Amino acid sequence: MSFRFSVLASGSTGNAFYIESKKERILVDAGLSGKQIDRLFSEINIDPKQITSVLVTHEHSDHIKGLGIIARKYDLPIYANEKTWKAMEHAIGKVPLDQKFVFGMGETRTFGDIDVESFGVSHDAAEPMFFTFHHHGKKVALVTDLGYVSERIKKTIEAADAYIFEANHDVSMLQMGRYPWSVKRRILGDTGHVSNEDCGLALSDVICNRTKRIYLAHLSQDNNIKELARMSVDSVLKERGIDIDLQDTDPAAPTPLYEVV
């Protein structure tokens, strides 16, 4: 059975994630312009007309910028929790009522042959949540935009076949960088973003023998570098006896479709 995904774009300039099975084609977040999203889909040879559902993690613009546009253009159903709907309604423009659905935090919903479990994260948005995707015994976990990784989240995401996991910043780069202190404090705080080192520590607690693929996601353009993120996470994992390939994501180019086997 085919179960594939692509990180279409990841970073503070825009986020979008695509996952499919034989029956379902799900987009998570649409944080780029409608044109950019169409281009990203064409790069992985997927026709956006075939998307079956759009899931929304939270209302920050780098996750919803093109949401209203593509929902109207392709007549797509949108799923978000009630607080996120309230927070983003003014930003996404008019969406017909029959395209609006509530997907509560901590719920599991079935989309065709994919079960999607939502879980809350600590981030400065109305009610941010991310997802694990389950299909015929395989599991994919999408985890970005969180200030820290709680034990509850670890239980939800443990033992996945693949992870898309935030490695937002290198702490020293952030502390010495050009951001005002208020922004630095927000990023480093409990409702901000996960650092490279914390990403490595959290991953070392949740991955298992079946984990084959890890994508480092939502890297800061100012306070991180792909090579540094990879090296930092890798060294934390190796310290704990874990040797696994780490994959990059990009703010403007999709990762090749990866089949979860």
Image: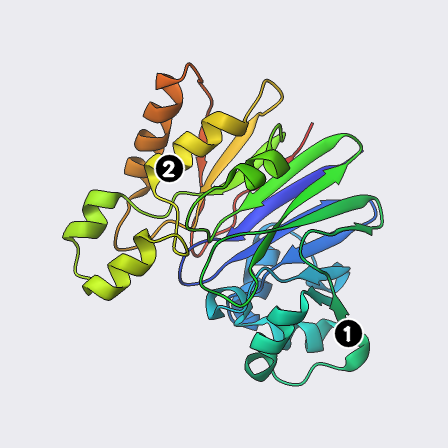
In percent of the image, x 50 and y 67: which residue is there? 32
Residue type at mark 1?
Gln
Please tell me which of labels 1 and 2 falls first in the chain. Answer: 1
Q: Quadrant of residue 183?
A: bottom left
Q: Nearer the viewer, residue 34 or 213?
A: 213
Residue type at mark 2?
Asp
Task: State the image coordinates of residue 235 (x, y, percent, origin top left).
Answer: 32, 24
The residue to which callout 1 is attached is: 99
In percent of the image, x 60 and y 37: which residue is there? 157
- In the displayed structure image, the side of residue 71 where residue 172 appears, left or right: left
Task: State the image coordinates of residue 205 (x, y, percent, origin top left).
Answer: 49, 27
Q: Residues within 10 Å of mark 2 (few under 14, many from 20)?
A: many
- In the displayed structure image, the side of residue 247 where residue 186 appears, left or right: left
Q: Nearer the viewer, residue 111 or 195?
A: 195
Asked whether residue 20 appears in the rendered view, the answer is yes
The residue to which callout 2 is attached is: 198
Q: Residues within 10 Å of mark 1 (few under 14, many from 20)?
A: some
